[in-house]
Amino acid sequence: MVRTFIGIELEKSVISEISEEISYLKCKFPDINWVRQENLHLTLKFLGNIQPNDLRSIFNDISVLENSVPSFAVSVSGVRLLPDARHPRIVCAGCSFGSNELVRLQQSIDKICNKLGYPLEQKDFTPHITLGRIKKPSFAHGFEDYLTDLNNVDFGITDVDEVVVYMSELGNNGALYSPMYRVRLG
C-alpha cells in the first residue's frame, strides 16, 4: 500500500517565509506539532493507502488537467486556526488571491478521483497550507492573542503551474513526502 495525496509545491521563497514564522511560533507554542520546512505544501486531495497498481490509473486520469487547466498564481498570507480558535486542530496559512482557482482545481481533481472510486470530499475545500497540528486544545492556549498580528502576515506568491501526486511515508521523525508524478498546467 502507498499512502498518497495530491497537492501543490510551494515556491522556495514562500517556504522560506513560512519557515521563519514557524520558527517564531515554535518558541511560543512548543507542544504544537510543527510541519518541517521540506514538507510544506498545499493538499488538494488525500487519497490514503492505495494499491501500487492503482497509481497508474491516477497518473493517467489526472493527466487531463494538463490541457484543461491554465496555470495561475496564489497569494499566501495570514495565519489562522482551523476549524476555529475555540476548537483548534490546525495552524495554517491562508490563500487569498487565486483561491477561487484553487477551489476549481480541487473540485476537478475530486471528480477525477471519484470516477476512480475515491469518495468526494464531504466538506467544502478551504485552500490552506498546514503549518502545525494541535493534538490537545491546551497546546494552543493563548494562540488567539497572536491572531490579529498574524492575520496580515504576507508569505508571498506561489505559481501553480503543476499538480503533484505525492507518496507519504510515516517514520519515527514524522512523515516524508516524495513526489511520484507531476502534471504541468496550462
Image (cartoon, helix red, strand yellow):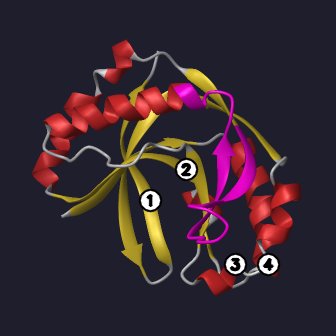
Residue 20, percent across and down? Answer: 81, 60
Nearer to the camera, 18 or 97: 97
Q: Secondary structure at mark 4?
A: loop
Q: Is residue 159 left or right of residue 184?
A: right
The residue carrying mark 2 is 41
Q: Earlier in the sequence, mark 2 or mark 4?
A: 2
Q: Earlier in the sequence, mark 1 or mark 4?
A: 4
Q: Please name the amino acid that badge 1 sits on.
A: Tyr
- Circles 1, 2 touching at the beta carbon (< 8 Å): yes
Give the Cα separation between the discs numbered 2 and 4.
26 Å
Which is in the foreground here, disc 3 or disc 2? Answer: 3
Q: Is residue 21 left or right of residue 31?
A: right
Quadrant position of the N terminus in the picture = bottom left
Residue at point 45%, 84% (across, down): 172
The residue carrying mark 4 is 142
- Circles 2, 4 touching at the beta carbon (< 8 Å): no
Give the Cα separation between the discs numbered 3 and 4.
6 Å
Residue at point 59%, 59% (across, down): 38
Q: Please name the amino acid that badge 2 sits on.
A: His
Q: Is residue 183 left or right of residue 17?
A: left
Q: Identify the image quadrant of residue 86.
A: bottom right
Q: Please name the amino acid that badge 3 sits on.
A: Ala
Per the rendered image, the range of residues in magenta is: 76-100
User: Can residue 74 be found in the magenta stretch?
Assistant: no
The residue carrying mark 3 is 140
Q: Secondary structure at mark 2?
A: strand
Give the Cα separation between the discs numbered 1 and 2.
10 Å
Which is in the foreground here, disc 1 or disc 4? Answer: 4
Give the Cα separation between the discs numbered 1 and 4.
31 Å
For disc 1, the neighbor class at 10 Å (few under 14, some 14 to 19, many from 20) is some
For disc 2, the neighbor class at 10 Å (few under 14, some 14 to 19, many from 20) is many
Q: Is residue 5 above or below residue 49?
A: above
